[in-house]
Image (cartoon, grey):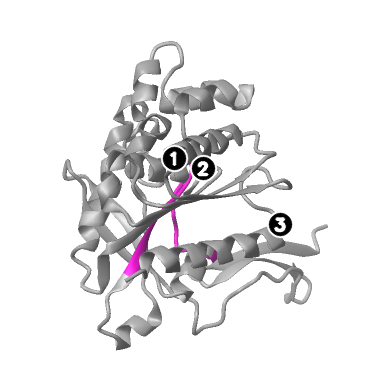
Amino acid sequence: DCHALAMSVNSVTRGLDVSIIELNDLTDTLSSESIRTSKPISVVPTSVTYRSFDNLTIPAWLYTPAFQQESSKKLPCVIHIHGGPAMQSRPTFQPLIQFLVANGFCVLDPNIRGSTGYGKRYAHLDDGRARFNAIKDIIAARDFLKSVNYVDINHLALVGGSYGGFMALCCLAHFPRLWAAGVISSAMADLESFLERTSIHRRDFREREYGSLNTDREFLRAISPINHVQNIMAPLLIFHGINDVRVPVYESDRLVERMHALGKPVRYVRFKDEGHGLDSTENKVKTYSEIADFLNHYLRAD
């Protein structure tokens, strides 16, 4: 017989917790307690939409610091690009976003084409050679932010991890004059070398998304930021774990090497005890602090 039920719960202001419910008396025991923010810090986002270059409607979440309601000062802003690309940003607890908002940044978290949750057609609108259209969705996000009267459009950064980091790099390389800074983690810089070096069991799946090594190398080279490093103008902060088997650390190593050779401003944090993303609380605290210092320096410079 079943005597207890385990249930996981989270929200935009509370991380994932697990509760054990005793079915005999319906008592609730919290068996885990997430790191959570206090009410004055946590911000509930606003659901917004904007139009991309081809009139496609792009859904997004806009996070605004609570104190902005009492201030007329324009704020620097971050466009946060989720990974995947077959994922969806939802109003669940996202520590990095809440941390950025607590530090006085607006954050726009869009579900650009290729995101899940909006039907099969939307999820496949970025496949293969249509990847450039997804980049244009991020450019359109910047255009949308021009209409938000408290956003300082001249102090705008891109933040993304994994595929989100790749898309951020693409924007920085192909549209370099639009951004004040970029923060990238565990990201591909070259789709060609990524497909050659990622885990074998992932390659076929990823080729269906990004393009084939056999037939699409010219396109893969054309879109990959590693081949356009000379165009990047914004300073970059890059994180990567050396044990990453999804996106090998070679991707960031090579990007940083080229940026240094060209005299581009870049700071590189290479974690010896991490893989794809961050697991260690100590490393998360270090990373968030580095991001805050970096963005405060470059987005509040004047």
Q: Amino acid at mark 1?
A: Phe
Disc 2 target residue:
162
Describe the element under mark 1 as helix, strand or loop: helix
Residue at point 33%, 47% (across, down): 233
**What percent of the width, then of the height, locates residue 38?**
56, 82
**What percent of the width, then of the height, locates residue 25?**
77, 77
Is 24 on the left-hand or right-hand side of 102?
A: right
Q: Pointers 1 and 2 in contact (CB under 8 A)?
A: yes
Disc 1 target residue:
166
Is 150 on the left-hand or right-hand side of 298?
A: left
Q: Amino acid at mark 2?
A: Ser
Is 73 on the left-hand or right-hand side of 243?
A: left
Residue farthest to the right, as pictured: 1
Q: Is residue 76 above or below residue 218?
A: below
All told, the count of numbered labels is 3
Describe the element under mark 3 as helix, strand or loop: loop
The answer to which quarter of the image holds residue 101 is bottom left
Residue at point 29%, 38% (across, down): 174
Is 295 on the left-hand or right-hand side of 200?
A: left
Residue at point 74%, 47% (across, down): 273
**What percent of the width, then of the height, locates residue 240?**
60, 45
Q: Amino acid at mark 3?
A: Ser
Q: Main secondary structure of the magenta part?
A: loop
Q: Which mark is residue 280?
A: 3
Describe the element under mark 2 as helix, strand or loop: loop
**What percent of the width, then of the height, locates residue 187?**
51, 41
Nearest the camera: 222 or 214? Answer: 222
The N terminus lies in quadrant: bottom right
**CA distance for labels 1 and 2:** 6 Å
Nearest the camera: 25 or 116? Answer: 116
Q: Which stretch is magenta?
A: 76-95
